[in-house]
Amino acid sequence: MAAFGTVFMPEMALATYQNDQWSDTQIVQSDSIQLHPGAHVLHYSSTCFEGLKAFRHADGSVKIFRMDENIKRMVQSSRLLNLPAIQPDQLAQMIKDIVKQYADEVPAPPGSMYIRPTHIGTEGAIGKAAAPTAASMLYVLLSPVGDYFTGGAKPLRLLLAEDGMRCAPHMGMIKSGGNYASALGPILQAKADVNADQILFCPGGDVQETGAANFVLIDGNEIITKKLDSTFLHGITRASLLTLAADLGMQVSERELSVTELLERAAKPGTEAALSGTAAVLTPVGTLIQHGKEYKVGSGEAGPTTMKLRQALNKIQWGESEDKHGWLTSL
Ligand SMILES: *Cc1c(COP(=O)(O)O)cnc(C)c1O
C-alpha cells in the first residue's frame, strides 16, 4: 500500500474568489494549479484545510462522515485567517460532486476515501504581509487510503513537552499549514533524541494535543481530555468519540489534565491513552517520555476500551450500526 496521502484521484473540484465573488465550481485536473509566485499563501501562509472521509457501505452506497462539521470548521478557519468567506453550501456541493464522480474508487472498509478541502490566498501581492488576500482558491482533493492500523500498529511513543508549544496559542483552533510548520522542528528533534512518534504538547504542564491529533486518557470508566479552548484543534473525531463514550455509559470529563496527574494515572494498570483524529481514528499510546525517562501507560499495549470506542466509531462509519446521531451524509 502506498504511503497515506500520496495517491490522488485525477480530478478535483475547484472554485476561485476574486472581485468580491466566488466563481462557479469547476472539475479540473488535480495534478497542478496555476499560481502567481507572489501569491499571498506562499509568503504569508494564508491557508487552511480540512480532512474528512467517505466510506463504502455493504449495500454499495457511499457516505461522508460529519461533512457539515468539517465545513463549519473550515468556514471558521477561513474567517480567523481573514481569507475570503467560504460559502458552506457551495463547499458541500463541491465535496459531494467530486466524491460522486469517484464513488467507484472509494475503498471498502477498513479503507476509505480521504477528502482534503484546501483554501489558499492567491493574490499576487507581496506587500500584503499585514493585509488580507483579495483573491483565493478553494479546491477539494481526493485520496484513497487504507487503514494504517491493520496489521497491528505498535502503540505510540509520545514525548511530553512542557516548555514550548505547538503553535501560537491564538492559532491553535485553526487547521492551518503554518501550525504544522511550527511544530515540525520540535517533532523531528523528538524523533532523533528519544525515538518518539510524536510530541504531546503540554504548555506549562497542561496536557493539550499532539502535532496532528487530540489526546485522550482512559481510566476505568472515565475518559479525560482537555476542555475546548482556542489554543488547540477541536477534533471532530474527539467530539464523536466523547459522544459514543457517553452512549456507552462512560463518564466524560472535559477538563484540565496536568502532566503530574497524567503520569500518576498512567502508572496504574488498566489505564489507556490514545490519539484521536480522522486519519488516526483512535490510536493507542503505549509510552510517555519525560526528561529522558519512559513511563508505560497501563500495560503499554492497546487497551480494550480504546479498541471498543474505535470499533463503535468504525461501525457507524461503515454502516454496520445505526447512525443514531445523523453523522452520515449521502451523495
Ligand atoms: C486535524 C487535527 C486534529 C483532529 O481533528 P479531526 O477533526 O478529528 O480529524 C487534531 N489536532 C490537530 C492539530 C489537527 O490538525
Image (cartoon, rainbow, N blue to C red):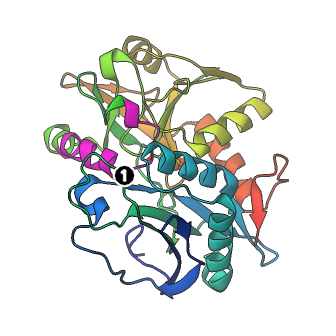
Residue 289's place in the image compared with 133, above or below, is: above
Q: Does the magenta stretch include residue 303?
A: no
Q: In the displayed structure, does residue 7 sit left or right of residue 127?
A: right
Question: Can see residue 103?
Answer: yes
**Residue bearing the label numbered 1:** 132
Residue 166's x, y, as percent?
Answer: 31, 35
Q: Which residue is drawn at 72% across and 25% down?
A: 250
Q: Residues within 10 Å of mark 1 (few under 14, many from 20)?
A: some
Q: Residue at x 55, y 42 (%)?
A: 235
Three-letter residue code for mark 1: Pro
Instruction: Decide whether the magenta segment is chiefly helix, strand or loop.
Output: helix
Question: Can see residue 220?
Answer: no
User: In this view of the protein, which residue sits in the foreground, 224 or 64?
Assistant: 64
**Region of the chain picked out in magenta, as a range:** 170-188
Residue 50's place in the image compared with 16, above or below, is: above
Where disc 1 sits, the SS reads loop
Residue 132's x, y, as percent?
Answer: 36, 52
Asked which quadrant contains residue 3, the reply is bottom left
User: In this view of the protein, which residue sits in the foreground, 208 or 270?
Assistant: 208
Residue 39's x, y, as percent?
Answer: 28, 66
